[in-house]
Amino acid sequence: MANAMLHQSVGSLQLLGNSGIHGEVGNNSVRLFPKGFKVQIGFSKGGTYSSGERKCSIRASASQTSVVNPVLSPSNNDTHESRKKSNEAALILIRHGESLWNEKNLFTGCVDVPLTKKGVEEAIEAGKRISNIPVDMIYTSALIRAQMTAMLAMTQHRRKKVPIIMHNESEQAMAWSQIYSEDTLKQSIPVIAAWQLNERMYGELQGLNKQETADRFGKEKVHEWRRSYDIPPPNGESLEMCAQRAVAYFKENIEPQLLAGKNVMIAAHGNSLRSIIMYLDKLTSQEVISLELSTGIPMLYIFKEGKFIRRGSPVAPTEAGVYAYTRRLAQYRQKLDEMMSN
Ligand SMILES: O=C(O)[C@@H](CO)OP(=O)(O)O
């Protein structure tokens, strides 16, 4: 098969290449934080706050300080320890639904454009496909099209937990978004918005029509800007540059959650996700050229024993389709069925 072109399609993910597809409580308040955050909550005059990517703390008076890791388990019966032992977690990747600039065929990059009506429908459809798959944490880019997609998709989830956007940008934002009920907390999913998952910055192409740009600079040149690994568009990011932030964020922040047994959904963009898939599937810079992602189609991976196993795109909530449930996913689904019938 050395030079033979193998064309495989797994849901929305298509790869054309010669090696195929590889395959937080104080003062009775509760904060929602992913594991990995060190959270000390409580209030005392002059309390200090420091925020980093993964560590946030509010120093409280000694009597009020407590440290909690309230992030949510996929099922109430399933303890954190047992999940750690089972060493398996689901990872769902979704490229946002169609945006108003996708519709107009404009280079978008980091311009913050909302979804079209079709994009809204795609996101809802994506949500149906993953409605039986556990989601404990959601990561999105800082851009509205990815956030809309994640939120709309979650309206379809059978578990009916509420996705809640974390506001850790300031002490006040954190304090004003506290949750004061542990029960409510258990029915919530933290949503973390990270600029590192944004679309690649398209430089001087942002806002230009893709067809007109190809007519002007030549199809090959524009294809090179759009799909090559290391050639950046004028004053923009190459996929390699985009990977340097997106994959680094994934490794630093998301992988530890998966390792701890948390099921994660990432709603992001064509190129930030291409760079992450390149890492997950160990694609070469040559292979990633042919990797195309459709809007609004979820892709499922299982993280097990330190490896990412691609299961394809769930075709429907009730059909195994191109992927098969793992035993753990089947059990989760069975629990949902039981909950619904009660
Ligand atoms: O315009 C963009 O930001 C992206 C995704 O729509 O374009 P491309 O298809 O070149 O990756």
Image (cartoon, rainbow, N blue to C red):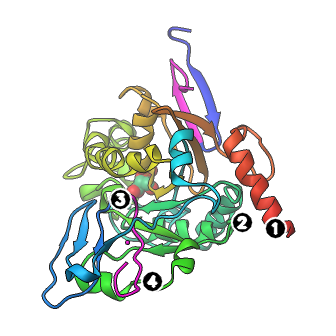
Give the image quarter of residue 32.
bottom left
Contact? badges 2 and 1 (CB < 8 Å):
yes
- Quadrant for the C terminus in the image: bottom right
Furthest residue toward top: 2
Q: Which of these two is toward me, 305 or 227?
A: 305
Give the image quarter of residue 197.
bottom left
Residue at position x 76%, y 60% in the image? 336
- Give the residue type that dot 4 points to: Ile
| Magenta range | 13-35
Expressed as whole percent of the image width and height from the top left, the position of residue 53 reads 25, 60
Disc 4 target residue: 179
Q: Which mark is residue 158?
A: 2
Q: Is residue 109 above or below residue 7?
A: below
Disc 3 target residue: 198
Q: Is residue 210 visible?
A: no
Q: CA distance from mark 1 to mark 4?
A: 27 Å
Whichever of callouts 2 and 1 sits on the residue coming sooner in the sequence is: 2
Expressed as whole percent of the image width and height from the top left, the position of residue 84 reads 50, 44
Whichever of callouts 4 and 2 sits on the residue coming sooner in the sequence is: 2
Instruction: Give the secondary structure at mark 4.
Output: loop
Q: Is residue 89 above or below residue 19?
A: below
Q: CA distance from mark 3 to mark 1?
A: 36 Å
Expressed as whole percent of the image width and height from the top left, the position of residue 270 reads 45, 50
Residue 33 lies within the magenta run: yes
